[in-house]
Image (cartoon, grey):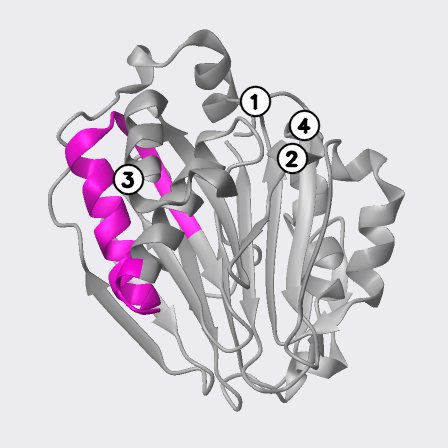
Amino acid sequence: MCRLFGLHAGTDVCTATFWLLNAPDSLAKQSRKNPDGTGLGLFDRQGRPQVHKEPIAAWQDTQFATEAHELTGTTFVAHVRYATTGALDVRNTHPFLQDGRIFAHNGVVEGLDVVDDRLRELGTADLVLGQTDSERVFALITGSIRARGGDETAGVVDAVGWLAANAPIYAVNILLSTATDMWALRYPQSHELYLLNRRRGHGADFDLRTHRIRARSEHLCARSSVVFASEPMDDDPRWSLLEPGELVHVGAGLDITRRIVLPDPPTHLVRPEDLNLPARQAQQGSR
């Protein structure tokens, strides 16, 4: 199972160092079980998107570790890949960038020929540069956002709603980010996705410990932020599991909107035993 991580720091620029490399169960540690690629996308202090990714594991990738320490921005999306579709190539490595938005996905979507037909209808087939289902899902969302006049929320709902009706789905957990906003969707129940709302003043000291790691961040002690992750990354009791079909939107002021947008399971729900061997191993390999 791939790992997703998202951090929204509001309008204040912050560093992602703590969350990517030092937190308990951080992405760098998880990637030892997800050896196919890592990536980090962010919007810098000028609101410009940056994507840095390599088709190898983070524990072997010193560049990834360096970038995690040095890059600053307002919103971050990180991904650790266990390949199910597509070769070990940078074009198949998350996050992806389209129309000035950053995207990462965890899950499996089948029936890619049907998805490709839909992308041609929307005029976004040319956005797919690799072979993954994930990049196709993003192109579908991008096409739906364009059709909705730039409304990201409506575009996500339309795109995944179309997938739910027309394509075999095991899981579509996604993170979508701009410089000011972040969206997270869990669909259906196959994989978990968690939200941590770290409001300023709710536990001022930011000091996390395990029997292996102590991670401290003065930078985030007095600052609010919102975090998304495939699993809780520390013992904070405020981690909240998204419901199946739930879409979460975090605005520039860290205002959070949560609603169930896909209450029903996919028409063609793929069960674990229906997956091909590489996909089944990928879903189980990081647990």
Q: What's under tag 2, amino acid-wise?
A: Arg
Numbered disc in front, either 4 or 1: 1
Cα distance, mark 4 to mark 2?
12 Å
Numbered disc in front, either 4 or 2: 2
Q: Pointers 2 and 1 in contact (CB under 8 A)?
A: yes
Cα distance, mark 4 to mark 1?
11 Å
| Residue 164 is a magenta residue | yes
Sooner in the amino-acid sequence: mark 4 or mark 2: 4
Numbered disc in front, either 3 or 4: 3
Please indicate whether residue 143 sits to the left or right of residue 56 in the image.
left
Q: Pointers 4 and 1 in contact (CB under 8 A)?
A: no
Q: Which mark is residue 91?
A: 2
Q: What's under tag 1, amino acid-wise?
A: Gly
Residue bearing the label numbered 4:
36
Q: Which mark is residue 247?
A: none
Sooner in the amino-acid sequence: mark 3 or mark 1: 1
Residue 135: percent from left, percent from top:
49, 39
Residue 165: percent from left, percent from top:
15, 35
Q: Pointers 2 and 3 in contact (CB under 8 A)?
A: no
Magenta extent:
147-174
